[in-house]
Image (spheres, rainbow, N blue to C red):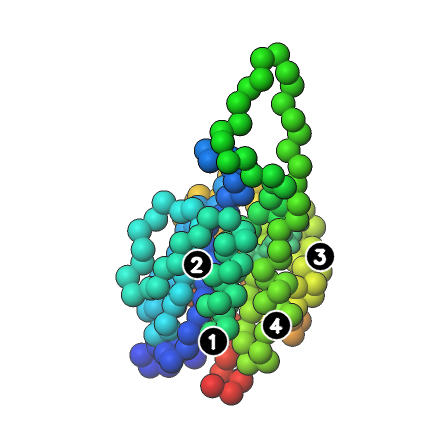
């Protein structure tokens, strides 16, 4: 893998990485969330810095220290993440959406804590769709940008991955199989990276850093084929 003598094949590039999982508030103390730890996104940010990139990390609800040399933008909900990612992406060479973005958010936000009413059953939670940030990036992309998505699938991993890659008009989709004790909160990961050009790269189970390096290998190769 040609990473150059100094390994800084992303020097002069600006990359945006999203990490963690969005929280969709119900009231001041409650939210709908997910189990993303942010470890994969943070590994992507650290490895990109080591390869010479300027890195903006849009981070949602993680319990991790800021990586050295990274500009960290903290967000809570999917709507906030969209704002931060789209604004950082405008001048970026590559965007990697490693965050778990909630598909839906509650229609209503209660300014005061929701209380139990004596004896009454609770109201159902009505949900509305969140914006699909990755799909939007695919729509507004410049031709020289590289857009990367992540997909966690429990079944038909490859077929679902190919369909998702096409639907979102990304260059690369990192597909991992998730289950009870796979991926979430663990330091290691295994994945298949699908390319819009038909390519397939299998990354064996290993540290999330190793998967991150494989992602940057593929991103760097695509950037090199495009005007700087
Ligand atoms: N994503 C996003 N905005 C959303 C939902 C997802 O940007 N509202 C991004 C994720 O960050 C990830 C990719 O899209 O990079 C795939 O997310 P995933 O949940 O697997 O795909 P969905 O299109 O939401 O499909 P589903 O959950 O129904 O499988
Ligand atoms: Ca989803």
Q: Is residue 112 visible?
A: yes
**Residue 214's x, y, as percent?**
47, 66
Callout 1–callout 2 Cβ contact below 8 Å: no
- Residue position for label 2: 58
Q: CA distance from mark 1 to mark 4?
A: 12 Å
- Report the mark closest to the observer, 2 or 3: 2
- Residue position for label 4: 140
First of labels 1, 4 by sequence position = 1
The image shows residue 210, relative to residue 218, as above or below, that is: above
Callout 4–callout 3 Cβ contact below 8 Å: no
Looking at this view, name the residue that lies furthest to the top. 119
Looking at this view, name the residue that lies furthest to the left. 68
**What residue sits 54% from the left and 73% below the top?**
146
The image shows residue 221, relative to residue 149, as above or below, that is: below
16 or 48: nearer the viewer: 16
26 or 177: nearer the viewer: 26
- Report the mark closest to the observer, 3 or 1: 1
Instruction: For label 4, count other residues whose C-alpha is less than 10 Å away and answer few (under 14), some (14-19) or many (20+).
Output: few
First of labels 4, 3 by sequence position = 4
Give the structural element (helix, strand or loop) at label 4: helix
Callout 4–callout 2 Cβ contact below 8 Å: no
Left or right: 127 as drawn, with respect to 17: right
How many circles with numbers are drawn on the protein? 4
- Residue position for label 3: 159
Q: Indicate the quadrant containing the N terminus: top left, top right, bottom left or bottom right.
A: bottom left
- Residue position for label 1: 91
Quadrant of res 185: top left
- Report the mark closest to the observer, 4 or 3: 4
């Amino acid at each position: 893998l040609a990473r150059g003598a100094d390994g800084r094949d992303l020097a002069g590039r600006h990359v945006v990485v999203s990490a963690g999982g969005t929280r969709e508030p119900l009231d001041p103390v409650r939210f709908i969330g997910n189990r993303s730890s942010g470890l994969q996104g943070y590994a992507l940010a650290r490895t990109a810095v080591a390869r010479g990139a300027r890195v903006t990390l849009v981070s949602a609800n993680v319990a991790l220290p800021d990586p050295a040399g990274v500009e960290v933008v903290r967000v809570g909900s999917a709507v906030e993440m969209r704002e931060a990612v789209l604004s950082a992406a405008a001048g970026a060479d590559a965007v990697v959406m490693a965050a778990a973005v909630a598909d839906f958010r509650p229609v209503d936000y209660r300014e005061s804590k929701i209380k139990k009413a004596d004896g009454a059953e609770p109201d159902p939670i009505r949900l509305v769709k969140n914006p699909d940030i990755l799909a939007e990036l695919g729509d507004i992309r410049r031709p020289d940008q590289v857009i990367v998505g992540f997909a966690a699938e429990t079944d038909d991993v490859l077929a679902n991955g190919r369909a998702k890659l096409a639907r979102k008009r990304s260059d690369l989709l990192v597909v991992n199989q998730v289950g009870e004790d796979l991926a979430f909160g663990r330091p290691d990961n295994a994945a298949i990276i699908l390319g819009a050009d038909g390519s397939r790269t299998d990354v064996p189970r290993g540290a999330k850093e190793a998967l991150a390096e494989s992602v940057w290998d593929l991103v760097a190769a695509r950037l090199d084929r495009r005007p700087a």
